[in-house]
């Protein structure tokens, strides 16, 4: 966190969208329960959870997918506003963090959307008007999973809308090993938590053999 603050990102801005300390501890505990060799992270933001995964699973191969938008764009897309004037994108910071901890080599960073693109035309217009070329950000989930899967563990912390969560889980489930686990973030009782839980419920209706457990903001499907 302090490394990212030194890169010019306000601490509150980082914390607003990243795993908190107790979520990170749960992520570490679940990740360490088995020997996870191949891991997929969907939704890195600026690299906090990515660094947690790298620190607790240094023997793994970790593939990360993120839409990789400029950090200042968050002010256009979110209600909460931050003092942030920085055109660098998410994966720029993720790469810096991973170099800082000297474990970049275990990671593969992929720019793009996982299973679905922008939720609505309004957000899409904002992003295009900002100057983002969407041809550089395609839907790449299946291609990534075909190339690097199947995975022992996936950490899903990307688009929290119900439909997106259901779609991400549906795609992911074909590329998780039978004994593998999907960890989700933000499954609490607030607005986004409800959205994520509803996405999980829709997924579970089609996969009744799977079990869903919740510990605070962290949920896991196994
Ligand atoms: C809540 S943040 C992730 C926080 C990060 N896991 C952490 O704890 O440090 C959500 C991230 O998901 C990315 N994202 C949103 N929708 C996506 C999608 N459909 N595919 C891939 N990434 C997406 C955003 O660019 C953003 O960086």
Image (cartoon, rainbow, N blue to C red):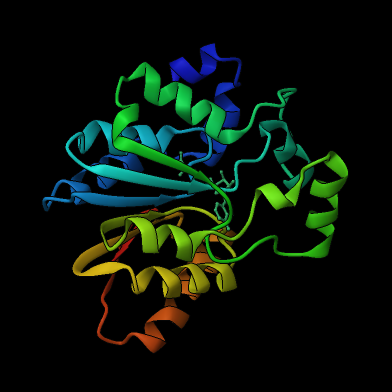
The quadrant in which residue 60 appears is top left
Indicate the quadrant containing the C terminus: top left, top right, bottom left or bottom right: bottom left
Judge whether 154 appears above or below 14 on screen.
Answer: below
Judge whether 221 appears above or below 14 on screen.
Answer: below
Asked if one can make out residue 188 in the rendered structure from this viewpoint, the answer is no
Residue appearing at x 49%, y 74% in the figure: 166
Question: Would you say 124 lies left or right of 8 here?
Answer: right
Residue appearing at x 50%, y 20% in the figure: 4
Rendering coords of residue 218 (x, y %): 35, 55
Q: Residue furthest front?
A: 147
- Count numbered badges in the picture: 0
Rendering coords of residue 114 (x, y %): 53, 59
Q: Which residue is more in the foreground, 184 or 192?
A: 184
Indicate the quadrant containing the N terminus: top left, top right, bottom left or bottom right: top left
Judge whether 4 appears above or below 175 on screen.
Answer: above
Q: Which residue is more in the foreground, 9 or 61?
A: 61
The quadrant in which residue 10 appears is top right
Question: Would you say 191 lies left or right of 198 here?
Answer: right
Asked if one can make out residue 109 in the rendered structure from this viewpoint, the answer is yes
Residue appearing at x 35%, y 72% in the figure: 173
Rendering coords of residue 208 (x, y %): 30, 87
Residue appearing at x 45%, y 16% in the figure: 2
Q: Which residue is more in the foreground, 49 or 168?
A: 168
């Amino acid at each position: 966190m302090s490394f990212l603050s030194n890169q010019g990102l306000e601490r509150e801005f980082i914390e607003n969208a990243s795993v908190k300390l107790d979520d990170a501890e749960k992520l570490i505990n679940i990740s360490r329960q088995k020997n996870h060799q191949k891991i997929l992270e969907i939704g890195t933001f600026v690299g906090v959870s990515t660094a947690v995964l790298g620190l607790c699973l240094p023997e793994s191969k970790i593939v990360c997918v993120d839409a990789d938008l400029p950090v200042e764009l968050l002010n256009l897309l979110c209600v909460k506003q931050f003092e942030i004037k920085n055109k660098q994108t998410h994966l720029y910071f993720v790469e810096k963090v991973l170099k800082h901890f000297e474990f970049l080599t275990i990671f593969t960073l992929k720019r793009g959307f996982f299973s679905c693109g922008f939720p609505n035309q309004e957000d899409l217009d904002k992003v295009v008007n900002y100057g983002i070329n969407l041809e550089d950000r395609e839907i790449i989930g299946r291609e990534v999973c075909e190339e690097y899967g199947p995975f022992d563990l996936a950490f899903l912390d990307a688009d929290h809308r119900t439909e997106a969560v259901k779609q991400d889980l549906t795609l992911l489930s074909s590329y998780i090993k039978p004994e593998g686990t999907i960890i989700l973030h933000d499954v609490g009782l607030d607005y986004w938590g409800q959205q994520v839980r509803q996405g999980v419920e829709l997924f579970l209706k089609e996969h009744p053999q799977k079990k869903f457990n919740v510990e605070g903001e962290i949920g896991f499907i196994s």
